[in-house]
Image (cartoon, rainbow, N blue to C red):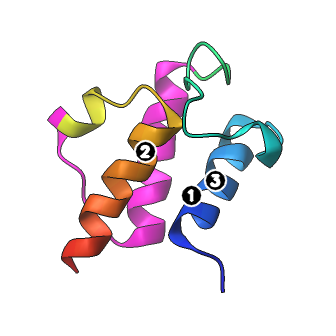
Amino acid sequence: MASIQDKAQALIASKLKVSEKEIAPEKHLFNDLGADSLDVVELIMILEREFNVKFSEEETANIKTVGDVYALIDKYTKKS
């Protein structure tokens, strides 16, 4: 069974059309992976649906790196 981070990594790679090998916690979604703001909004929606969570607007506004995505998912999946 894939870990939450593995699932998130696959979803990020698919949405941003990059190799999963390029997805690392320190990678910046915009500068390193070529995302734009619409990509990130759509990615958040995909992640919320996949993990059955709802992130706050404040939290999603602060997402800059893959690590930020992992931390936010981890925060919400640990609550369940």
Tell me what residue is drawn at x 55 percent, y 19 percent.
36
Residue placed under numbered mark 3 in the picture: 9
**Amino acid under disc 1:** Ala
Is residue 53 in view from this perspective?
A: no
Of residues 38 and 23, the one nearer the viewer is: 23
Position in image of residue 58 (x %, y %): 16, 33
Q: Is residue 9 left or right of residue 25?
A: right
**Amino acid under disc 2:** Val
Tell me what residue is drawn at x 42 percent, y 65 percent.
49
Tag 2 and tag 1, C-beta contact below 8 Å: yes
First-in-chain label (2 vs 1): 1
Residue placed under numbered mark 2 in the picture: 69
Q: In what quadrant of the picture does the N terminus appear?
A: bottom right
Q: 10 Å neighbourhood of mark 3: few (<14), some, or many (≥20)?
A: many
Position in image of residue 34 (x %, y %): 67, 19
Tell me what residue is drawn at x 36 percent, y 31 percent.
63
